[in-house]
Amino acid sequence: MSTDAHAAAGQLASPAADGGGVIHNIGYRRYEGERLGRWQIVRALTWHSLRAAFGIGRGAKAKIFPVLLFALMCLPAVVNAVALATANGGGQPIVNYDDYIPSLRTVAMLIFIALEAPVLVSGDLRHHTLPLYFARPIHRIDYPAAKLLAFFLACLAMIEIPLLILYLGIVSQSHGASDVWAQTRQLGPGLLYGAAWAALLASIGLLLASTTGKRVFAICAIGIPLFLSWVLANVLGHVGQQAFGPNGFGHPSALASLAGLISPFTLLGGVLQWLRAPELLGPDDHRIGITIVGQYGSVYGVVFAVALIAAIVGLVVRYRKVGVA
């Protein structure tokens, strides 16, 4: 640089003679702190998604439905605790750990899945923010894995916390360590069954929600198939019981036994009946939410495993394609 150029630069860097102002260097400061890696990013994404599923960090309107649905799920446990307390230790629980009012759990979780699954994934698709995630040191599988883990935990909280409230309400009225231990042994299978609910519904919900970036369309893509399949499974099961009745060996008809495979909710109910004692349910049992499996209990177990794996693999494949695009 010439002497004249240096002099001109000096004049620009110093206060002007007329007091007009100064040119400052406002360049960005380099980050010199610790840079977090892949697992810290996945953990942060999981935690943020879990909070978003319950409306935490969002507006007041976003918290209305999660709070109402959670309160609705906890209501039977609270009523059961009050009933036991007013019975002076002589009453019996009105709610079980495993089949925790199937119709209530089905409706509440259907609404929760349909409303909250799009919150976790549709916005990123709509605003095209996925390239920003994949520009960081994470693998393409990390994004769907973090979202699935977060939504699984959210569904788990919706299902398991009412069971824990139910357990505490019963134990508080129990007499002796033997009663407490008996309730604890009954709670374990109920928690495992609730985890199966959370895993299957979270996987299917996120897979359907990831098909579109528009939240309204995503809600319809989840709610309509889940609701119609549940209604169809119950209708066909009822028709199978009424029209065909039990076969010559006293077992329910094939239509009544296999109708539950249509819907994830009745599929889960069938898995429960298979793991329990299906012979306790007669062919004329018409209780709402009860799936009749007959001789096909193992089929329900296989279909459940296949559906869960297919939903998870489909979600991963979906985001591999989105990442490439």
Image (spheres, rainbow, N blue to C red):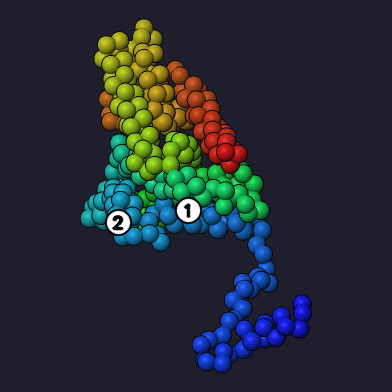
Which of marks 2 and 1 precedes in the sequence?
1
Which residue does the numbered mark 1 point to in the structure image?
Answer: 49
Toward which corner of the image does residue 251 lie, by quadrant? top left
Q: Is residue 87 above or below residue 304?
A: below
Observer-nearest residue: 13 or 89?
Answer: 13
Q: Measure the C-alpha gap from mark 1 to mark 2.
A: 17 Å
The residue that appears at 49% across and 57% down in the rendered structure is: 48
> Which amino acid is tagged 1?
Ser
Residue 61: mark: 2
Which class describes the residues within 10 Å of circle 1: few (<14), some (14-19), or many (20+)? many
The residue that appears at 34% across and 52% down in the rendered structure is: 66
User: Is residue 308 something one can see in this rendering?
Assistant: no
| x and y, in percent, of residue 87 in the image | 23, 52
The image quadrant where one finds the N terminus is bottom right
User: Is residue 128 something one can see in this rendering?
Assistant: yes
The residue that appears at 59% across and 76% down in the rendered structure is: 26
| x and y, in percent, of residue 198 in the image | 45, 42
The image quadrant where one finds the C terminus is top right
> Element under label 2?
helix
